[in-house]
């Protein structure tokens, strides 16, 4: 299973927020803005026998204008990548549906919303994408493309994630809370059924 950490790629430029003139997001790299691209690359590796590079994903994001706002618009780029690799694509806001999709062999990219009044984001303080690999009755296995030492020990995060690097495990209730201010909260990818 391929694991990509965006923090390892400060040398690959990824300009986002292209619709806003003079935005500070124009001069970012994969390190700051590439969580969605890393999640897509890991998803392709998991569901297919092929790979896709971060540079190819950047080119697709720019071509299809998935970089008009800060970060990556998965509503745009998700279907593009799914089509390239003959995958089915759909979305949901329901964690139970996302978990069932994982149990059926699919992959899910979760759109976590970060900090908000009365809540400290566990996977990010701002918007972030993480790849969900599998689900059991009481836990979800996550690949977090911005994993770093001590991330889940910060105040407000302690004890909410069990780490067996690079795999992180959290409860369905936590993942539901992490995504409840996003629409959609989950992007579902799966191999197409044979005809």
Image (cartoon, rainbow, N blue to C red):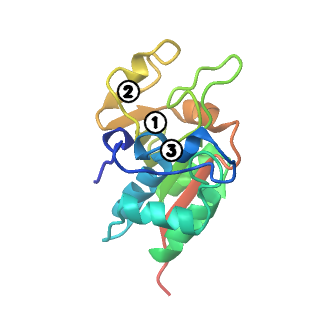
Residue 146 position within the rendered picture, expressed as x and y whole percent measured from the top left: 40, 36
Element type at mark 1: loop
Q: Residues within 10 Å of mark 1 (few under 14, many from 20)?
A: some
Q: Would you name the residue on which mark 1 appears?
A: 139
Q: Position of residue 106 (x, y in %)?
A: 47, 60
Q: Is residue 28 visible?
A: yes
Q: Earlier in the sequence, mark 3 or mark 2?
A: 3
**In the figure, residue 149 lies in which quadrant?**
top left
SS at mark 2 in the image: strand
Q: Position of residue 96 (x, y in %)?
A: 61, 46
Measure the alpha-carbon separation of dots 3 and 2: 34 Å
Disc 3 or disc 2, which is closer to the eye? 3
SS category of the residue bearing label 3: helix
First reached walking from the N terminus: tag 1 or tag 3: 3
What residue is shown with label 2?
Answer: 162
Can you say whether 11 is above or below 127 in the image?
A: below
Q: Identify the residue shown where x is 55% and y is 70%.
A: 80
Circle 3 residue: 27
Q: Residue furthest bottom?
A: 195
Q: Earlier in the sequence, mark 1 or mark 2?
A: 1
* Circles 1, 2 touching at the beta carbon (< 8 Å): yes
In the shown orientation, is residue 26 left or right of residue 135?
A: right
Quarter of the N terminus within the rendering: bottom left
Compute the Cα span from label 1 to label 2: 10 Å
Q: Is residue 185 left or right of residue 28?
A: right
Q: Is residue 46 visible?
A: no
CA gap, disc 1 to disc 3?
A: 37 Å
> Which residue is more in the foreground, 9 or 80?
9
């Amino acid at each position: 299973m391929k694991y990509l950490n965006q923090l390892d790629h400060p040398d690959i430029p990824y300009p986002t927020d292209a619709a806003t003139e003079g935005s500070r997001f124009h001069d970012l790299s994969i390190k700051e803005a590439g969580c969605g691209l890393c999640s897509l690359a890991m998803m392709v590796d998991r569901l297919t026998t092929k790979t896709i590079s971060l540079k190819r994903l950047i080119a697709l994001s720019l071509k299809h204008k998935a970089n008009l706002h800060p970060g990556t618009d998965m509503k745009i780029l998700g279907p593009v990548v799914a089509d390239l690799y003959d995958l089915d694509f759909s979305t949901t806001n329901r964690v139970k549906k996302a978990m069932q999709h994982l149990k059926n062999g699919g992959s899910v990219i979760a759109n976590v919303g970060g900090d908000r009044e009365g809540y400290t984001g566990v996977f990010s303080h701002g918007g972030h994408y993480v790849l969900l690999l599998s689900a059991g009755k009481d836990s979800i296995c996550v690949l977090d493309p911005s994993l770093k030492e001590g991330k889940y020990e910060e105040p407000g995060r302690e004890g909410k994630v069990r780490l067996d690097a690079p795999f992180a495990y959290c409860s369905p209730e936590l993942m539901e809370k992490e995504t409840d201010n996003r629409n959609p909260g989950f992007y579902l990818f799966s191999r197409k059924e044979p005809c």
